[in-house]
Amino acid sequence: MSAHDHADGHLPHEPEKATLEGRNKVLGFWLFLGAETVLFGTLFSAFLALRHNTGDGPTSQELFELPMVFAATMILLFSSLMSVFAVQAMHKNKVKPMLGWLLVTILLGLGFLGLEVYEFLNYIDEGHKMPTSAFSSSFYTLVGFHGAHVAFGILWIGLLILQVLKKGLTVVTAPKIYVSAIYWHFIDVVWVFIFTVVYLMGKVG
Amino acid sequence: MSSNHSAAGEEARRHKVEGPRKHIVAFVLSLALTLIAFAAVASGEINSQFTYIILIGMALVQVFVQLAFWMHMKDRGHLFPIMGIIFGVIVVFTMVIMASYWVWW
């Protein structure tokens, strides 16, 4: 503990940038996000190329329901705001409020995931399965990949909460919180393109 | 990085904790842009070509707002993150244009 504590027992300002390791972690994470951008880009380009090839399956106009998509969008947007508040609490060295915001973040993430599972089950009932058409395959791959990222984020932030409970907020744990918040915002950024390109443009035709 | 080390120390002494105001503004902006996009489709009044333009425009602005404020890209010392994301975006745009125009030409 003592090696990581500040001389006067307080955390430095912006503890995520206080050590070289922390700064490198943030930089490395951004390089990872550049690669993630490319990964989602390939899935988006495949979806855009195949979205009209519905074969015998339902089309996007028949399938998508805007209220459900809107609810999912709002949940994720609020969740992103909650993780902003978590990082702000961290900057003020308020550990308990920070953990509270993180908990709300992952609870909203779970809500989003539950809604997505419900939505996929509905689609399967309507005959929109993974092998139905090129549209359905590229749809499930793209949206499912995003859902998997949400699930991973929930697991990751959940483990970080446990770690902070055990080790406290230090210059070692602070960069992890900061980086996980950036990851969560990135998931929201990807969702902005999904609700625009997949759902809204799908509804327009 | 190393050249502005002492400057960073200076700033830490004068450092004031960033308030939530900017982030709330970013949230309200995101909310408004989302509502405009959904309303444009839900109303069904606007022709599809124009709706596409609105949708893509709203998405790009919202992503810019979130990257700048929530992901701290407007803050100092984010040259490499900006380069990383720009590189990713260049690759993505190339792929999207290739897949949507070239494949089915």
Image (cartoon, coloured by chain):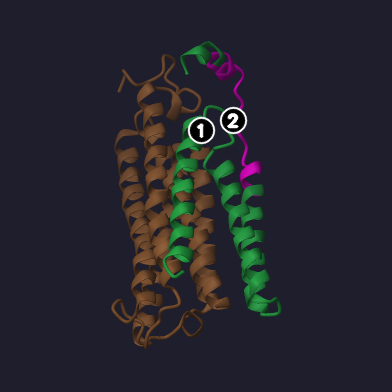
Mark 2 falls on what kind of element? loop
Is residue A88 in view from this perspective?
Answer: yes
Please tell me in which quadrant of the rendered image residue A152 appears. Answer: bottom left
Specify the quadrant of the image occupied by residue A22: top left
Residue B97 percent location from the top left of the image? 49, 59
Nearer to us in this view, B95 or A34: B95
- Residue B17 shown in magenta: yes
To the question of a shared chain for discs 1 and 2, the answer is no
Residue at image coords 62%, 42%: B20
Instruction: Note whether A94 is above or below A135 in the view shown.
Output: above
Question: Outermost residue, right direction?
Answer: B45
- Residue B91, how many percent across, how many down? 44, 48
Q: Colour of chain A?
A: brown
Q: Residues within 10 Å of mark 2 (few under 14, many from 20)?
A: few
- Tell me the residue that label 2 is attached to: B17
Disc 1 and disc 2: Cα gap in Å?
7 Å
In this view, the residue in front, A36 or A151, is: A36
Residue range (magenta): B8-24
Q: Position of residue A99 (x, y in %)?
A: 42, 44
Type of secondary structure dominating the magenta stretch: helix
Q: Hey, what amino acid is under mark 1? A: His
The numbered mark 2 sits on a residue in which chain?
B
Residue flagged by tag 2: what amino acid is it? Answer: Val
Q: Colour of chain B?
A: green
Q: Which residue is mark 1?
A: A91
Residue A160 part of the magenta-drawn span: no
- Contact check, label 1 and label 2, Cβ < 8 Å: yes
